Amino acid sequence: MEQFVIKGGKPLYGTVRVQGAKNSALPILAATLLVEGIHEIRDVPHLSDTDVMSQILQALGVKMRWDGNNVKLETSSIKTARIPEFLMRQMRSSIFLMGPLLSRLQEVIISRPGGCAIGARPIDLHLKGLSLLGAEIEEGDGFIRCSASRLTGAEVRLDLPSVGATENIMMAAVRAEGETVIKNAAREPEISDLERFLNLMGADVHGAGTDTIVIRGVQRLTPVSYEVIPDRIVAGTLAAAAVMTGGEVLLTHVIREHMQSTLNLLERAGATLKHEGDVLWVKGTSRLRGVGEVVTEPYPGFPTDMQPQVMALLSVTDGQSVISERVFDGRFKHVHELARMGADLVPRAHSVEIRGVPRLTGATVQATDLRAGAALVIAGLAAHGTTRVLGLNHIDRGYERLDRTLLQLGGQIQRWTGKIASC
Ligand SMILES: CC(=O)N[C@H]1[C@@H](OP(=O)(O)OP(=O)(O)OC[C@H]2O[C@@H](n3ccc(=O)[nH]c3=O)[C@H](O)[C@@H]2O)O[C@H](CO)[C@@H](O)[C@@H]1O
Ligand SMILES: C=C(OP(=O)(O)O)C(=O)O
């Protein structure tokens, strides 16, 4: 069974460039469907999620050519509005096809998206938003058909600031007739990145980064060349790994403002940080301390996508911490796996109390979702002895060759693809 085998206890040192953001690349790739022509999206990470997105786009009729991390997409001929179910189920982000296809073809047929098992992830807000723009929604036989001969601008107030719903509605609205106002919109940096991309194509979108986004429908869009922003969660994961192993790393291609809440937390735990331009210097210490309470929240609050990695880090601090998860209702599956490595964690209803221990010890552990997997990897790098992390398919959804990146920083990690007796 494929696994990472990690020999822990070695501080990470060195420099790495942070990959482009998964959560920007996925909606932006989907948004290329809005207009026919040749688009170029740069710094797209090679991930299983971007691979599934490519497969979906190609199944729809898009021609794609990769050159390293840059991808050219020829979107002139779209032959179907139906997204193959087996692809739809492979990731949550397949839902991003809804807005652009509805706008381009006046119809889209999907099944429920898949994604990480981190709690209930309904799509009611996506559907509600699209129906307010005039889409008719029919559900049956496991499929959802959305159609609209004409989309019309409307006011959409989201019950909660969903990242995906905000993005889907933005994409559907760029060519709708009139003005759409999204209230209680999510404010994540990837939404601002999508706004920049759409506006470069000729759209008229304002307010991303605030809780009110205004989209004035335009008639014409043109394809563009665009580079996605750096991945703030990958940068945060690598920073946490450096701190937890007592190492010192330089991360390049970082937008520090996007990581403020993560960096504040690392500093509270005892890390030393400096930044200049797009470079972040992170230094750990052998005397990490508990931080009290951490609560995950929509941006600019502490990101749920860093919660498992930070739990791993806080488990080897001197003192106590409590993490409350407020975004997803099932994102604590890593708790039992970290406990196998010696972490002293007390789960409560929506929070986990972390009683710091001096060290973790290597064990065989199972990644149950993307960030849980990342947490187990960084725990393994800091632990004494050998850790085997199973479930690499989850990690490959969001980290481009994580083993190679960590090897570059001196981590002792290997990807085993066959059976292993011992090592
Ligand atoms: C590709 C991408 O960008 N993924 C990110 C995006 O996921 P995603 O866009 O799926 O996350 P949302 O912001 O939509 O989810 C936030 C909360 O809203 C709920 N909800 C969402 C939609 C809906 O129609 N109804 C509903 O109730 C969800 O169950 C969850 O409890 O934001 C999450 C929260 O920052 C991140 O963890 C994911 O990495
Ligand atoms: C939950 C995540 O992603 P997705 O929304 O793609 O499942 C994540 O990136 O941690």
Image (cartoon, helix red, strand yellow):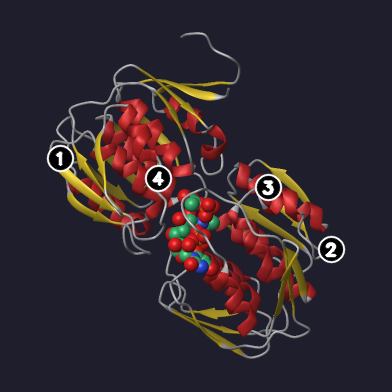
Q: Position of residue 137 (x, y in %)?
A: 70, 76
- Residue at 65% across, 59% down: 112
Q: Give amino acid for label 4.
A: Ala
Residue type highlighted by circle 3: Val
Farthest residue to the bottom: give it.
178
Local crowd size for mark 1, using a 10 Å CA cut-off: few (<14), some (14–19), many (≥20):
many
Q: Check the image and report above or below for 156 versus 229.
A: below
Q: Is residue 263 left or right of residue 372?
A: left
The answer to whether residue 292 of the structure is visible from this angle is yes
Q: Looking at the image, is mark 3 or mark 2 earlier in the sequence?
A: 3
How far apart are the two marked residues, 1 and 4, measured between alpha carbons? 21 Å
Could you give the CA–CA distance between mark 2 and mark 1, rounded to whole angstroms?
Answer: 55 Å
Q: Earlier in the sequence, mark 3 or mark 1?
A: 3
Q: Earlier in the sequence, mark 4 or mark 3?
A: 3
Pinpoint residue 14: horizontal percent, then vertical percent.
36, 30
Q: Depth check: 22 or 193 in front? A: 22
Residue at mark 2:
80
* Residue at disc 1, secondary structure: loop
Residue located 37% across and 46% down the image? 332
- CB within 8 Å, label 2 to label 4: no
Q: Earlier in the sequence, mark 2 or mark 1?
A: 2
Kindly identify which residue carries mark 4: 235
Above or below 35: residue 64: above
Q: Which residue is mark 1?
A: 289
Local crowd size for mark 3, using a 10 Å CA cut-off: few (<14), some (14–19), many (≥20): many
